[in-house]
Amino acid sequence: MDYSKFKKAKAIPEASSMIETFRAIGYTLDTAVADIIDNSISAEAKNIWIDAEWKGKDTTISILDDGIGMNNDNLIKAMRPGSKNAKETRPKKDLGRFGLGLKTASFSQTRKFTVISKAYDYRAIYWSWDLDFVNETGSWDLIQWIPNESDWLKKIEALKSGTMVVWWDIDRLIKDSEVDNEKDQSKFLKVIASTKYHLSMVFHRYIDDGLKIYFNGRLIESWDPFMLGSKGLQTTAETLLENKAIGIKGFVLPHRSKITSQNYDRGKGPKDSWTAHQGFYVYRNNRLLVAGDWLGLFKRVIHYDLCRIRIDLPNSFD
């Protein structure tokens, strides 16, 4: 079709309304942090450091990696909503798709966030999204400002290359919180503990392959839903589909009588329930997308508590 003959009019989205829409996608803190880590893995990071510093309403959360980093042009592109074409062929290990994860995950938790990056042989550079500034100007403009700039830059300058995402003004989680309020702090620490457990499950295969994720200085251990190597574990032969691109494998976990009480409690997983963790585990490029769900095929009943089924998908089957 020849579009040149048609009359045209621009319909540019109103900036503040669009970004407020990004905030309503439905992330929790744990899923938002996991989306940031996806970018770190795609950037070939070997180490990831997550730091959550409680300061009441001034609390900050940062995610730093030692991946390949970005120069100024690439960083601005990464900060742009929809920075990827979903139809483009991606590298097999790429965990992103639409170029929205960094932005939607961050905006779901905070009104202001900064990405600082350093490519090899480059100095660190940074840009920030500030929703209050966007509302005031109505424009899609980044700003180059972050509180305590030198402290953040010092952290990334210590690496040969890498990227750090800093969330500051985390209104969804700690709005109006007081630094000396024990109830506010307890609520925050509970969410942080849940996030650590979530990451141990979502990235367990990467952690087992050598990725190191630190949370406030402590190394996160992987949580393997299939208890591989345990005495009494039963497995089915793997079924391969779509020219061996998709793999499906079943696991019947050991009966309680065959494992220690410690391993039994660990088998309950982040949801602290064997029943809640039965079902399908769907992975894309070894990254867990769905954890313990029958996908509408069966009901949860106690008789299936030991049944967990692994489905492996490549990113080409999104």
Image (spheres, rainbow, N blue to C red):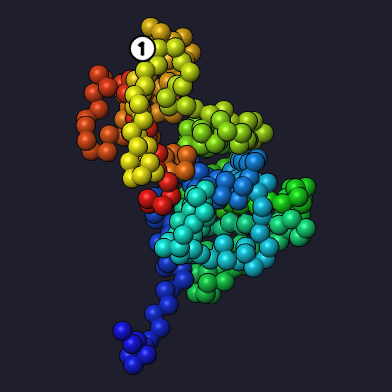
Identify the image quadrant of residue 49: top right
Labels in figure, total: 1
Q: Position of residue 82 (x, y in %)?
A: 47, 64
Nearer to me, 125 or 310: 310
Q: Which residue is drawn at 76% across and 60% down?
A: 122
Query: Which element carries disc 1, helix, strand or loop?
Result: loop
Q: Which residue is drawn at 57% across and 46% down?
A: 41
Q: Which residue is drawn at 36% across and 12% down?
A: 255
Q: Residues within 10 Å of mark 1 (few under 14, many from 20)?
A: few
Nearer to me, 115 or 202: 202
Q: Mark 1 points at which residue?
A: 255
The quarter in which the N terminus is drawn is bottom left
Image position of 105 (left or right of 124)? left
Q: Position of residue 111 (x, y in %)?
A: 53, 57
Identify the image quadrant of residue 73: bottom right
Q: Where is residue 65 in the image (x, y as percent from the top left)?
A: 65, 46
**Type of the residue with mark 1:** His
User: Considering only vertical position in the picture, is 108 above or below 288?
Assistant: below
Image position of 275 (left or right of 30)? left
Q: Of all residues shown, which one is farthest toward the top?
A: 257
Q: Residue at x 48, y 13 (%)?
A: 262
Inspect this view and state whether residue 43 appears: yes
